Image (cartoon, rainbow, N blue to C red):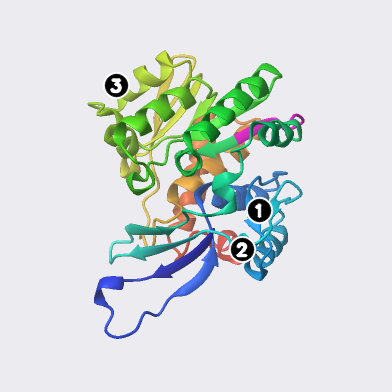
Amino acid sequence: MLELTRDNLRQARGSLPMSLSYGGDTLNSAVYLARQGIAVDYVTALGDDPMSAWLVAKWRDEGVACDLVEFEPNGVPGMYLIETDDRGERSFYYWRDDTPAKRLLDDADRAKTIFAQLSGHAWLCLSGITLAIYSESARQHLFERLADYRRSGGRVAFDSNYRPKLWSSLQQTRQAYEAMYRLTDLALPTIEDEQAVFGDDDQFAIIRRLRSSGVGEIALKMGEQGCLVVVDDQQELIPARKVDVVDTTSAGDSFNAGYLAARLSGQAAASSAESGHQLASVVIQHKGAIIPRNAMSSN
């Protein structure tokens, strides 16, 4: 996805100064995983236009393998605009209704071919935005392939990352998320998203619902309160780090990357949450979803 950023669109007076970059929740996490030395492949579809070629070149420069990226003739990548207010909070605007990524799993045979290439991967990480851009039939193809992937020993991480504008109804979202959680080994949701979709009273209601769906490990992000980690019925609240917030665009995505990198390196869930907080605390002190590489080592 192409990313346009604008500090405060509503205060514009005859001009729209913006910066152009790239991003998207799972891509942001992939980049931050690669920067931590984790081998990661990215799966999506782009076009055959110069902008798609630019995107892939940028991702490869970050160490993200792109051998599984498909290129659709006459296609173009999606685009979104992020408006950031004075507190670092964001508003999103999307242009992605006719993108190759949206059609990636439309064909059942194509979905099988894609997942056959993923058989050697230990983890698959996806989000609520992944689900939202697909058609109903494509989501079913995804769920069928994820079930096969897990039966063969693969594990699935899911961040619900709810974006209302991408869904036709709340009921559609709930049905998709319920199906997805039944296929999830590690849940990385945010409390506000879960409450918006399911109406949970508090974090404990969320944990009970996810556990009843069969999710074995949960890292529930709760903003300034920290992260509630649940493994094998053991719960622990890991406090967030206090920093001056500039831009929260990739707060959750970078937390996910820090958490996953630590878990893949053999750390316990609690210390992995601390790693997630550490990385997110650095990222939100800078503008943009993907901060300069040297900014990560300077904090």
Part of the protein shown in magenta: 119-124
Residues at badges 3 and 1 in contact (C-beta under 8 Å)? no
Q: Amino acid at mark 2?
A: Arg
- 55 within the magenta span: no
Please identify the dominant SS of the magenta region.
loop
Q: Amino acid at mark 1?
A: Arg
Question: Mark 3 — residue?
Answer: 205
* Residue 196, position as x, y percentages in the image: 28, 36
Alpha carbon distance from label 2 to label 3: 38 Å
**Where on the picture, by quarter, is residue 157?**
top right
Alpha carbon distance from label 3 to label 1: 35 Å
**Where on the picture, by quarter, is residue 263?**
top right
Mark 3, mark 1: which one is toward the viewer?
3
The one of 215 and 229 positioned closer to us in this rendering: 215
Residue for point 33% across, 38% down: 193
Q: Earlier in the sequence, mark 2 or mark 1?
A: 1
Q: Earlier in the sequence, mark 3 or mark 1?
A: 1
**Is 188 left, or right, of 120 in this rendering?**
left
Residue for point 58% across, 29% down: 141
Classify 5 as above or below 255: below
Residues at badges 2 and 1 in contact (C-beta under 8 Å)? yes
Classify 92 as above or below 189: below
Residue for point 71% across, 37% down: 114
Badge 2 marks a residue whose secondary structure is helix
Question: Mark 2 — residue?
Answer: 293
Label 1: few (<14), some (14–19) or many (≥20) C-alpha neighbours in 10 Å:
some
* Residue 33, position as x, y percentages in the image: 63, 47
Question: Mark 1 — residue?
Answer: 35
* Residue 92, position as x, y percentages in the image: 36, 57
Q: Amino acid at mark 3?
A: Ala
The one of 168 and 236 positioned closer to us in this rendering: 168
Badge 1 marks a residue whose secondary structure is helix
